[in-house]
Amino acid sequence: MTFIELMTSLIFVAIPLGLALFLKLGLERDILIATVRSIIQLLIIGYILTFVFESDSPVFMLLMILLMIGAATQNIIKKGDGIPGITWMILLTLVTVETLTMGLMLWLGIIPFEPEKVIPISGMIIGNCMVLSLLFLNKFKDEVERSDEVIELILSFGGTPKAAIERSLKSAIRTSMIPTVEAQKTMGLVQLPGMMSGLIIGGADPMEAVLYQLLILFLILTTASISAVMVGYLAYPRLFNQKLQFVGLTYRKGKTT
């Protein structure tokens, strides 16, 4: 695809922009900003990846992965407002998930230690972990705010913080994992996944594309479970003080633990 063809494809931006203007949705500015940012960011990352692939250096590959983790962390912590220490929790979760999944794939020989394989798959792992963490935090905070009286009641009867918040915690974990599980059920029937479609468009054998896509699906399922569980069990103790009293979300009650 040439730059001229890319500019022609902006027609697919003009359509939603026109609809937003016609219906007065107030999304015109967001659509324009999103379009400009995506173009700039992807072009920059394209040049960076070209340099990293050509250099074939593990150092640059590691730096690229750290950059992705840092960007994902910065995006997630906005949703974690009100949970003390959310930054290090998210950072630890992303590093753990990436190290575990990528380490297992390299150790088992599933993929070779090459930038062309490691970086794109790491991006999918980190990106999915980011989305699942956002889903979890959004649901978890909502559950905590709606169940604060129940939590305090359980504590007043001698229950532990874990027992008091367990229902809210498990509900948030389950809710954040459902989209991943349900998407896998219809994969290949309702839609052709992104990686599989990209490989086929790039000229790869369809069966090879299917095998790579199945690998990504399995990785996403692992990512969904580990990220939600890790963030949840790291976050909930911060909603209680040293005396095991429930203090809730600090931005709501104006308290710190």
Image (spheres, rainbow, N blue to C red):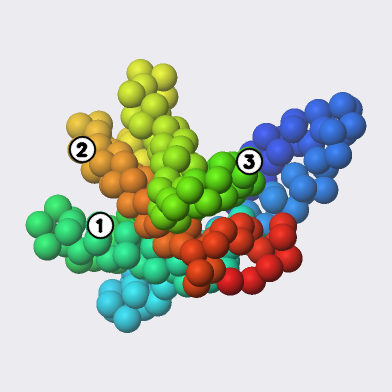
Q: Is residue 194 above or below residue 137?
A: above
Residue 244 picture location, percent across and down: 49, 64
Mark 1 or 2, nearer chain start: 1
Closer to the observer: label 1 or label 3? 3
Q: CA distance from mark 1 to mark 2?
A: 17 Å
Q: Which of the pair 17/129 is nearer the observer?
A: 129
Q: Secondary structure at mark 3?
A: helix
Pair 1/2: label in front: 1
What residue would you read off at disc 2? 211
At which x and y percent is residue 192?
38, 28
Cα–Cα span, label 1 and label 3: 35 Å
Q: Is residue 99 above or below residue 138?
A: below
Give the CA separation, mark 3 to mark 2.
43 Å
Q: Picture quarter containing residue 62? A: bottom left
Q: Secondary structure at mark 2?
A: helix
Q: Which residue is mark 3?
A: 146
Secondary structure at numbered mark 1: helix
Q: Residue at x 75, y 44 (%)?
A: 31
Instruction: Tell me: 65 left or right of 11.
Output: left
Per the image, the residue denoted by label 1 is 101
